Amino acid sequence: MPAIPVWSLVALSNTGKTTFLEKLIPALRVLGLSVGVVKHDSHDFELDHEGKDTFRLSQAGAEVTAILSDTQFALRQRGALSPEEAVARVTGVDLILTEGFKHGPWPKLALCRAGSAPAVPLENCAALITDTPPASCPIPVFFIDDPTPLALWLAGQCKEETP
């Protein structure tokens, strides 16, 4: 089974990564691609809610707690994973987008608004997503308000990566 292509959307905090992904994912789905997302959270997020059965079982000491229905599945596991380990657990999709792993090993899509610097040097990125394109840029440039061209470009990149 070939590896699933992974692309990292990187930007400074509060630049609009999640908002952009909310537009990009439907554009990719229109092209027939299924998408997985792995998001970095610098806070200690809480997936479960106090008083619910899975919370209670986890509090009782379960190392892994899974919950499933006819339409969804979630797995909570104690302990940290590396970004690579988390991405490796995503299966059954055509591509994976990560949000926020600017030091990760995957090709980077830099999201940068006018007047701010990119989170990583552009020479380390595969493409730039912006509201105001620079006069010259060594990588492809896409507009933040129109995710369709980037979706088409990513679909083409995924086809090139698949043997």
Image (cartoon, grey):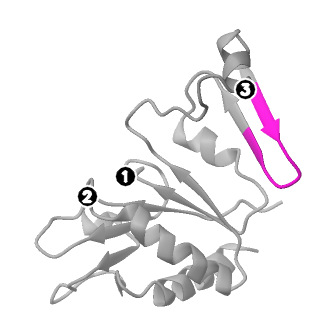
Dot 3 or dot 1: first in sequence order is 3
User: For residue 54, which quarter of the picture?
Assistant: top right
Residue depicted at x 72% and y 59%: 3
Task: Assign the C terminus to one quadrant of the image.
Answer: bottom right
Crowding at label 2, few (<14), some or many (≥20) Cα neighbours within 10 Å?
some
Residue at the far top in the pictured view = 60
**Badge number at residue 119:** 2
Image quarter hosting the N terminus:
bottom right
Q: Main secondary structure of the magenta part?
A: strand
Looking at the rendered structure, the secondary structure element under dot 3 is helix
**Residue 82 as seen in the image, left or right of residue 161:** left
| Residue 63 appears anywhere in the view | no
Amino acid type of the residue tagged 2 in the rendering: Ala
SS at mark 1? loop
Image coords of residue 117 (percent x, y): 16, 64
Residue 20: where, in percent of width, then height? Answer: 41, 71
At x 10%, y 72%, the residue is: 115
Residue at the disc numbered 1? 102
How far apart marks 3 and 1 lie (CA) works out to 32 Å
Give residue 29's quadrant in the image. Answer: bottom right
Badge 3: how crowded within 10 Å, few (<14), some, or many (20+)? some
**Which span of residues is magenta-colored?**
65-74
Mark 2 → mark 1, Cα distance in angstroms: 7 Å
Q: N-terminal of the two: label 2 or label 1?
A: 1
Mark 1: amino acid: Lys
Residue in front for this viewpoint, 162 or 96: 96
